[in-house]
């Protein structure tokens, strides 16, 4: 059994990027475009809108809280079987949903079943991607995550077309077939054995050591704070614009503009993250601080030009912080523990995501406009970036920390004592 | 003492009911003007006289403006603007639940001038509501002006056209319903350079609905049209997709209207067949709100496909909407589903076969964790010796 000393940084890795691209499209694109089905469900089951929107909420919650399970299973069995099983579960959930006779059926089939399927796919794929790349990790992650934005553009009209031609039952059947492509994406995830794999041990050992890892815990707190503020503008921007007197069509158009600048930001930041030497955490702090400042400026902007400029800038910076956020983790914990690490981070930060929107809505109800909620979102982001400063090697300007050998060394050094001959790889 | 005494003015006799004795009350109000006050009689239903020069022309309403007591208006003269001896005529109305609809077409609201013409009062159908609509046009209007009026229940309709021109002398005014020339029931008035003409009609059934046009002009005729229609009914513009064995609810509704009845028809092409009569299990017509109707069809089959019409029946006519129903069999999406699943299976097979093909080294394992890419051979060889330690440890640590 032979292990690689460093990630390949290319080669089959680009196929993994392709797989991750389609997976983020099929998981998050489907989730985001599900609003199209919303209207049909309200009419078909004669239920109020609030109860129907629980379907998506349950799906998202299961996907996020189930991430550690997906990660632990990937550590044990490798990402490929886990992701393929996840794809089958997600498709099965949609298939059963097409036969639903009540809203509860939809909660269980789409929410629970498809949600667990998604939990088994997304996190292991991103972790696998981080293992395949080191020098170009941020760029690869950025490219893969563009799948989310592009699919939102494509799937919403596609789902509407399906609804017009097949009604919601037929459309769900075909979305199930679409989700089955996750299995094909999973097949692309060739397992990779890296040098630190045997060192870090099985899932239980990894999780225990992670929970005692100071920088990891601080990073998790930082990401949770960031996540709390991150989603608020997405949820409240259109409502804020309508409050200021915008018509629905220009407001929706502005959201599309933000989505485009989000895409550009992801790729640009991915490239930048690899090009700039030093810990990626600094770039994350830069983008997070910028996003926080922009959000805090929102209440001040009244003129349409100011709002458009702020929205474009917000789209860019918030998109920019996503690939970098995923790239910090391998630097912290090493690629050996990436599966479990990513799973834990996703689970904890999702708490922030779930709390953010209702908190902002509460502020809106209490104060009467969105000023307080935007400022609070900005504050959370700035607090998160403040915590990031406490990460190790943050202020080392000349530390060449991006060499994978050092990661192995660090991982081996700090986690498990080794005899000397295990370190002589370079 | 009789009304219309020799004082020269004229008065209206209105039976109003009882006024509070000794209190000054307003028994009648000129539309759009301040109320006229008169003292009340002690508790008797005597007619109240409103007299004086302030009984001017126009519409007199009860103080709360809910009833019309009488109208003083100008009768159409035999020839325009001739000075005939004034013949004034007032009739009081017996019904007190009137409201007047006055359709006035005008750019600027200019008051009626009193020309010495005959007066006439409209009393028939005075327990109907009154609708007023107006159009304005100038001498040089290039397009004919149209106004659509939606009527649901019988009412008195007052249509006014206003024509602005420099030279009003030889302007001929005519009214037409459709293509039929109308002889009476309209009057003409002029102020400066604006000419008004007003047509009144009591719309009680569908025979009075249609297009009414006023024509001005000598050489170049200007036309203004009022289209009287029943309210529109909306079905669905997109076809409804359903599957065999399902049940579906087709709905039609109209905005702010109260049809007397709704009926449903189905059919292919242009033939309409009544549905729901006699009452059966398959088609159930119900009406949750007054302005909507729903047809529920159960146990759908492909024969139920086609267009369904809903007719709203008003006193003044009928209005219809349509809904298109498409019934698919489950096989239609199922075929697409199976095709896509087959494609996915094919993709997975290709990917896995490709991987096995490019393996230079094959190692037996049940989860493929030890598979590697061929070009990394060199690197791994050099690490092989050093990795024996970690490998050894992995076996130990995996044993937990």
Image (cartoon, grey):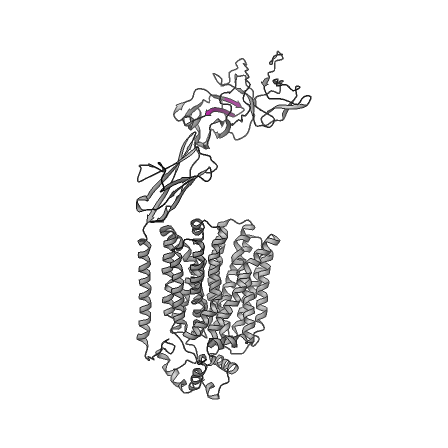
Name the one closer to the observer, B280 or B173: B280
Dividing the image into 4 quarters, which one contains the N terminus of chain A?
A: bottom left
Q: What residue is shown at x 51% (from left), y 48% (from top)?
A: A247
Instruction: Establish if A130 lies above or below A303.
Output: below
**Which image quadrant is residue A126 in?**
bottom left
Dividing the image into 4 quarters, which one contains the C terminus of chain A?
A: bottom left
Check if residue B359 falls in the magenta segment.
Answer: no
- Across and down, in percent, residue B72 comes to 55, 20
Residue A300 shown left or right of residue A10 in the figure: right
Name the one closer to the observer, B150 or A266: B150
- Mainly helix, strand or loop, the magenta region? strand
Q: Give the range drawn in magenta.
A: B188-204
Q: What residue is shown at x 59% (from left), y 17% (from top)?
A: B13
- Across and down, in percent, residue A5 comes to 43, 81
Name the one closer to the observer, B183 or B124: B124
Instruction: Establish if A161 lies above or below B228.
Output: below
Residue A386 shown left or right of residue A80 in the figure: right
- Across and down, in percent, residue A258 comes to 49, 58
Q: Can residue A70 be seen in this view?
A: yes
Q: What residue is shown at x 38% (from left), y 53% (from top)?
A: A169
Residue B336 shown left or right of residue A200 in the figure: left
- Across and down, in percent, residue A316 comes to 50, 62
């Amino acid at each position: 059994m032979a292990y690689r000393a460093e990630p390949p940084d290319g080669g089959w890795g680009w196929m993994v990027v392709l797989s991750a691209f389609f997976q983020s499209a099929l998981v998050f694109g489907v989730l985001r475009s599900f609003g199209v089905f919303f209207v049909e469900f309200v009419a078909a089951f004669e239920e109020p809108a609030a109860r129907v929107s629980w379907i998506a909420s349950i799906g998202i919650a299961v996907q996020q809280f189930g991430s550690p399970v997906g990660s632990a299973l990937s550590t044990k069995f490798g990402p490929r079987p886990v992701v393929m099983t996840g794809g089958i579960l997600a498709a099965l959930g949609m298939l059963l949903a097409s036969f639903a006779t009540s809203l509860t059926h939809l909660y269980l089939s789409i929410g629970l079943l498809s949600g667990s399927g998604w939990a088994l796919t997304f996190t292991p794929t991103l972790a696998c991607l981080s293992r395949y790349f080191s020098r170009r990790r941020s760029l690869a992650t950025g490219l893969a995550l563009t799948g989310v934005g592009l699919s939102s553009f494509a799937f919403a009209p596609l789902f509407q077309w399906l609804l017009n031609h097949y009604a919601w039952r037929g459309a769900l059947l075909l979305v199930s077939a679409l989700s089955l492509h996750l299995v094909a994406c999973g097949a692309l995830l060739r397992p990779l054995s890296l040098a630190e794999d045997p060192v870090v041990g099985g899932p239980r050992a990894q999780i225990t050591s992670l929970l005692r890892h100071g920088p990891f815990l601080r990073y998790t707190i930082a990401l949770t704070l960031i996540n709390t503020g991150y989603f608020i503008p997405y949820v409240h921007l259109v409502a804020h614009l309508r409050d200021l007197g915008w018509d629905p069509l220009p407001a929706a158009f502005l959201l599309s503009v933000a989505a485009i600048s989000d895409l550009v930001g992801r790729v640009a930041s991915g490239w930048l993250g690899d090009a700039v030497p030093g810990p990626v955490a600094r770039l994350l702090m830069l983008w997070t601080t910028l996003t926080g400042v922009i959000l805090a400026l929102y209440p001040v902007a009244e003129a349409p030009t100011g709002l458009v400029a702020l929205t474009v800038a917000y789209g860019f910076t918030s998109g920019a912080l996503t690939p970098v956020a995923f790239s910090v983790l391998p630097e912290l914990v090493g690629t050996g523990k990436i599966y479990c690490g990513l799973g834990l981070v996703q689970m904890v930060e999702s708490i922030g995501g779930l709390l953010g929107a209702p908190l902002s809505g509460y502020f809106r109800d209490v104060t009467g406009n969105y000023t307080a909620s935007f400022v609070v979102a900005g504050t959370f982001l700035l607090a998160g970036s403040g915590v990031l400063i406490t990460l190790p090697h943050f202020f080392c300007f000349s530390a060449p920390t991006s060499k994978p050998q050092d990661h192995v060394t660090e991982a081996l050094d700090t986690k498990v004592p080794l005899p000397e001959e295990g370190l002589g790889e370079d | 003492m009789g009304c219309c005494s020799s004082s020269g003015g004229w008065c209206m006799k209105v039976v109003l009911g009882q006024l509070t004795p000794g209190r000054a009350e307003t028994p009648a109000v000129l539309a759009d003007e301040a109320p006229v006050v008169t003292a009340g009689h002690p508790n008797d239903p005597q007619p109240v006289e409103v007299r004086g020069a302030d009984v001017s022309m126009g519409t007199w309403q009860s103080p709360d403006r809910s009833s019309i007591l009488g109208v003083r208006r100008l009768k159409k003269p035999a020839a325009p603007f001739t000075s005939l001896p004034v013949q004034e005529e007032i009739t009081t109305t017996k019904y007190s639940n009137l409201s007047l609809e006055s359709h006035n077409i005008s750019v600027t609201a200019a008051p009626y001038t009193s020309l010495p013409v005959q007066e006439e009062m409209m009393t028939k159908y005075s327990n109907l509501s009154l609708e007023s609509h107006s159009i304005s046009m100038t001498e040089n209007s290039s397009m004919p002006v149209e106004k659509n009026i939606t009527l649901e229940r019988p009412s008195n309709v007052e249509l006014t056209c206003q024509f602005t021109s420099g030279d009003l002398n030889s302007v001929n005014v005519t009214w037409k319903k459709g293509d039929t020339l109308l002889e009476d029931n309209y009057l003409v008035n002029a102020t400066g350079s604006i000419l008004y003409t007003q047509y009144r009609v009591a719309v009680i059934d569908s025979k009075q609905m249609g297009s009414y046009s006023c024509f001005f002009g000598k050489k170049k005729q200007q036309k203004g049209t009022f289209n009287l229609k029943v309210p529109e009914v909306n079905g669905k513009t997109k076809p409804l997709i359903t599957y065999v064995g399902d049940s579906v609810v087709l709905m039609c509704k109209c905005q702010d209207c109260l049809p007397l009845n709704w009926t449903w028809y189905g059919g292919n092409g242009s033939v309409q067949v009544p549905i729901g009569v006699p009452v059966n299990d398959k088609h159930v017509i119900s009406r949750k709100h007054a302005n909507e109707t729903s047809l529920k069809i159960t146990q759908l089959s492909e024969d139920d496909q086609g267009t369904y019409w809903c007719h709203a029946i008003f006193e003044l006519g009928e209005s219809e909407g349509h809904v298109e129903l498409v019934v698919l069999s489950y096989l239609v999406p199922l075929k697409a589903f199976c095709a896509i699943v087959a494609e996915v299976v094919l993709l997975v097979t290709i990917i896995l076969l490709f991987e096995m093909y490019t393996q230079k080294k094959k190692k037996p394992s049940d989860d493929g964790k030890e598979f590697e890419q061929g070009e990394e051979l060199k690197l791994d060889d050099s690490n092989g010796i050093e990795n024996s330690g970690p490998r050894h440890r992995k076996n130990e640590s995996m044993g937990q």
